[in-house]
């Protein structure tokens, strides 16, 4: 989905990493994400434009980074909100997006939404949730420049939508959503960041060539236990979205009482900052 500058739902489209159908090994056609409204990217393109200098962007995960997860009683787990009334902001999310955009960076939301493939979420419900999230962020002065969603999931489930139950190049940890956004908005990936609360966000960002920030309240010892995953070591850790903005923009004052935290790999010479 793509929302015009300001975060409002005036221009909405569902986008995937590929705009053309392709054939998987089994011979079944994989459907690309379909445009929900024709010409949805016009407002964004007018702002971004093309110049000799490429744009810098902050790619942001949605669920667990901008909005809180919702407990699914049926399956006994935390999941994405499915109705507008379930949407609750993560503390600092609006301030984070506001700071990023005021500094001249593009704010691009990239989100996995496998509920479409599983049959637990419709495109209209996804549109409604995104619209409500945009409204809440706007109250805090925040918003995004574009939102890209992957509706696929590789598991086969007869209760779901078979046309989206496929492998794809847009489901994080694959970098397809970021690469498509970079192509469409003239983004310099090497000068950009990926921010999220999951290691799949870190992996997608690193695969695309971005620097990465993991938003987590876990202790460093707990985080390090998960670092065995390939490409999952972030460049920075942040306790909340506003702290991530502090690291990215170099405005440490945004995160009051921020303290540097380094992983074992960092102490032995690897990157990052923390806030």
Image (tube, rainbow, N blue to C red):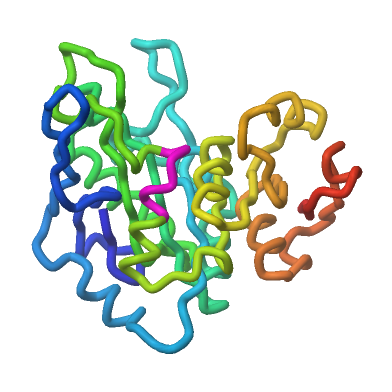
Quadrant of res 147: bottom left
Q: Is residue 101 magenta?
A: no
* Snapshot quadrant of residue 264: top right
Image coordinates for residue 107, horizontal then vertical, percent:
45, 64
Q: Is residue 76 above or below residue 79?
A: above
Instruction: Report whether 247 appears left or right of 158.
Output: right
Farthest right residue? 267
Query: What residue sits 47% from the left and 46% below the top?
Result: 61
**Residue 199 position in % (x across, y down):** 58, 35
* Residue at x 12% of width, y 33% of height: 29
Where residue 247 sits in the image (x, y, percent)? Answer: 71, 61
Number of marks present in the image shown: 0
Q: Which residues are magenta?
A: 172-178
Give the vertical position of 56 relative to 38 (above or below): below
Left or right: 149, with 222 as reference point: left
**Viewer-proximal residue, 87 or 151?**
151
Q: Residue at x 63, y 37 (%)?
A: 232
Q: Residue furthest bottom?
A: 52
**Of all residues shown, which one is farthest toward the left?**
38
């Amino acid at each position: 989905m793509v929302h015009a500058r300001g975060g409002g739902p005036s221009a909405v489209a569902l986008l995937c990493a590929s705009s053309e159908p392709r054939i998987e090994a089994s011979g079944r056609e994989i459907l690309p994400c379909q445009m929900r409204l024709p010409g949805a990217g016009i407002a964004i393109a007018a702002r971004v434009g093309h110049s000799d200098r490429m744009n810098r962007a902050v790619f942001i995960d949605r669920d667990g980074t901008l909005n809180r997860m919702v407990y699914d009683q049926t399956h006994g787990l935390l999941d994405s909100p499915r109705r507008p009334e379930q949407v609750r902001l993560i503390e600092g999310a609006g301030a984070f997006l506001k700071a990023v955009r005021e500094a001249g960076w593009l704010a691009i939301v990239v989100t996995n939404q496998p509920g479409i493939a599983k049959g637990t979420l419709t495109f209209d419900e996804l549109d409604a949730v995104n619209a409500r999230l945009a409204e809440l962020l706007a109250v805090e002065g925040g918003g995004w420049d574009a939102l890209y969603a992957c509706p696929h999931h590789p598991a086969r489930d007869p209760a779901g939508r078979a046309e989206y139950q496929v492998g794809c190049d847009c489901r994080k940890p694959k970098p397809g959503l970021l690469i498509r956004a970079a192509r469409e908005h003239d983004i310099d990936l090497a000068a950009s960041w990926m921010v999220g609360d999951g290691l799949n966000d870190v992996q997608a960002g690193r695969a695309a060539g971005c620097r990465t920030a993991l938003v987590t309240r876990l202790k460093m010892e707990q985080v390090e236990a998960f670092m065995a995953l390939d490409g999952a070591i972030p460049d920075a850790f942040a306790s909340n979205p506003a702290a991530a903005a502090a690291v990215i923009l170099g405005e440490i004052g945004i995160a009051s009482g921020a303290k540097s935290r380094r992983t074992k790999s960092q102490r032995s010479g690897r990157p990052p900052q923390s806030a």
